[in-house]
Image: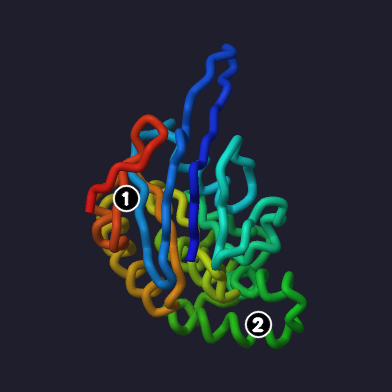
Amino acid sequence: MLELKGIRKTFEDLSGGHWLLADGLDLVVAPGQTVAVLGPSGSGKSTLLKMIAGLEAQDAGDISFDGADLAGVAPERRGFALMFQDFALFPHLNVLDNVAFGLVEQRVPKKTARERAQRMLSVFGLASHARQRVWKLSGGEQQRVALARALITAPRLLLLDEPFSALDAELRTSLREEFAERIAEAGIAAVLVTHDEAEARVIAEHGFRLVAGRLLTLW
């Protein structure tokens, strides 16, 4: 279970102004639950994910997972997977090795990692694309590869940062339902940040709006 208690975070812009992104913010995400955080650009949604991931430090408050305080725990040791809106795939690797990458980083033998990646690609309907370069795939296929890469390492928590914003409206509609199914099948907790409430309602059991550094319950 992910718990955020009393999180405070200020941001200083280039002109020296200070913005309060989190003002005593609290959030609980239960095992296997997907929670959505909505808000316009600049409201602090992505910064919230970065704090959970350990990529940015909060000014005050505590972040814990399964009762263990994450203060001082490096991002790579938290066991979380972060998906970005730009897919963040490796252009020099083929599809198979992109998906296998996280396992290789965990010191799984490359042959075993590739075998597991091939099985994961089959689940996503991408087995025939295994040897292709990722930049040759469509936007929807690239995003499926990104999700497959995130899920194959069996992360404790999945963090989704506007995962469909780079796609056209029709593709977003079809992918959000598929993502909801895949995340549910994996049985992991997830936090989605987005500006699209319709998208959030398809994927998340609970939704909040980030307003003036606080989370307001939507559903």
Residue lying at 57% horizontally and 12% vertically, measured from the top left = 15
The residue located at (67%, 56%) in the rendering is 75
Helix, strand or loop at label 1? It is: loop
Above or below — where is 161 with respect to 81? above
State left or right for residue 100 relative to residue 24: right
Q: Which mark is residue 168?
A: 1
| Quadrant of the image containing the C terminus | bottom left
Q: Callout 1: few (<14), some (14-19), or many (20+) C-alpha neighbours within 10 Å?
A: few
53 w.r.t. 93: above or below:
above
Q: Nearer the viewer, residue 77 or 14?
A: 77
Residues 8 and 86: in front is: 8
Label 2–label 1 contact, CB within 8 A: no
Image quadrant where residue 178 sits: bottom left
User: Which residue has dot 2 on it?
Assistant: 114
Which badge, 2 or 1, comes first in the chain's sequence?
A: 2
Three-letter amino acid code at the position of disc 1 = Asp
Q: Where in the figure is residue 150, as x and y percent of width and height?
A: 54, 67
Which residue is pictured at 56% across the width and 52% down the height? 63
Residue 134 in the image: x percent, y percent? 56, 63
| Label 2 packing within 10 angstroms: few (<14), some (14-19), many (20+) | many
